[in-house]
Amino acid sequence: MKINRVIYLGFGAIFLLVGISSLASEWQQRNQDQSFKLVVHTYEIKLNLQDIQKTLVDAENSQRLFIITGNANFLEPYYSSQRKIRSDLENLSQLLQVNPIQTQRLTNIQNLTNQKLASLEQGINLAGAGESEQVLALVGGVGKQIMDNIRLEINRMIDEEQKLLSDRNEGYQLIKQWAAIINWGTFILVITSGSIISFIVVRVIMSPIQQVTQVIATSSAEIAVATEQQQRLASHQAVSINQTTNAIEQISEGAKQSAEDADHALGGAQQVLDISENGNKVVQQNLASIVELNNNVANISEQIEVLRQHTGEISTVSNVVSSLANQTNILALNASVEAVRAGEAGRGFGLVAVEVRKLSDQSQKSARQIDNLVSLIQNSLKSTIEAAEKGTENAKVGMEMTENTAHVFVEVADGIKNVVSSNQKIAQISQQQAIAIQQVVTATNSINHAAVETASGIKQTQVGLENLNQAAQTLQILV
């Protein structure tokens, strides 16, 4: 259940109990007021009845004094009693509307009162006329009987009202007792229920809050530790990337040097090509002069010696080309390794390195072919020297060997042309490799800058997590 619902339900229950207590108090107060009004109502009726009786007694005494003294001044209570009795009867008529029995008795008292007043008036008239005997008979007979009946009816009504008063007093006291019980009961119920509801609300609210604060504190601490580890890793990564950048810059310098070496190799291969062409020309000249072989054996030997030197130079150049191809192969292999390390960013560079390795392998094969050809040329020259020593009888054999040599020189020229073409491609690839490595250096610098910013962001995150952990610990203390 959500916390706001728990709060609403808890305090709603307390407010409901307070409302019920207020309604009970209001009900008790109304009943108490009603009982009090009924008690006052009974006292008013009794007072009015007693006042009627007293007024009639006063009127009767006033009549007797007038009869005895003949002084009309004593009749003043008699005259005022009529107005007073009429007023009391009207009040009683209003007070007794809800009680039919008492209303009937009041009607009897009203009739008896009228008879009594009429009897008093008759006695006064007879006394004024000097009819003393009739007055005494009236006062002692009918007048006394009417007065006794009035007292009897009044006493009955007073007894009835007294009984009602007793019942109403008992009801009033009972209501007061119940009011006290209800007040104390509702007070104790509100206090007890409020305490229980408050305890439940606090437990329902504070228990999840304590659990949440505990989870926040634990999680923030764990995240802080993980963030610290990430910060160390990011710092190490930044250092590694920086070192990688330096290594790639060194590779870039090596690629530039490889391009320069490829240019030099291209120049050397061009020289070898020129030499092979010159050798071919020499062989052709030897072929044209084979007829004069017998007379020019010494010259042929010298030319063959020169040719041997040239073939040695070719072998040297071929070795250089083979060495360059081997170094280019190693550089291409290293470039492939670095491309794999660079991941997706070095994929293109890896493809270039593969092509470089292929060209390097082709260069090595061509160099081996040149070595083989040089070996053949040297063997041929050896045979030519032997043929020259043998003399003219081997001129035909020498001519054939010379022709073979010419064909070999043609093949050498073709192989050297292939070497030149391969070196040109290697030079182009080396230049492309240098450009690609420079792009990798730029990308690595960007990655290095991003790694530094990442380390800074992780540091700020760590500070925020420390603040969150401190807040969670403070919340734990509060709850």
Image (cartoon, rainbow, N blue to C red):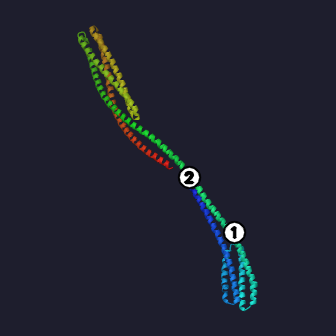
Label 1 close to label 2 by CB (< 8 Å): no
Give the image location of residue 249, x and y in percent.
34, 33
Residue type (three-letter) at the residue carrying disc 1: Asp
Give the image location of residue 447, x and y in percent.
38, 38
The answer to which image quadrant residue 302 occupies is top left
Is 94 left or right of 431, judged from the image as shown?
Answer: right
The answer to which image quadrant residue 269 occupies is top left
The residue identified by callout 1 is 167
- Label 2 Cα crowd, 10 Å radius (few <14 / some 14-19 / many 20+): many
The residue identified by callout 2 is 201
Above or below, 209 relative to 310: below
Q: Nearer the viewer, residue 270 or 256?
A: 256
Residue type (three-letter) at the residue carrying disc 2: Val
Above or below, 234 relative to 475: above
Q: Nearer the viewer, mark 1 or mark 2?
A: 1
- For the question of whether residue 89 can be seen, the reply is no
State the CA–CA distance, disc 1 to disc 2: 48 Å
- Label 1 Cα crowd, 10 Å radius (few <14 / some 14-19 / many 20+): few
Above or below, 343 relative to 12: above
Is 209 left or right of 131, judged from the image as shown?
Answer: left
Number of numbered discs on residues: 2
Q: Residue at x 65, y 72 (%)?
A: 40
Q: Nearer the viewer, residue 353 or 388?
A: 353
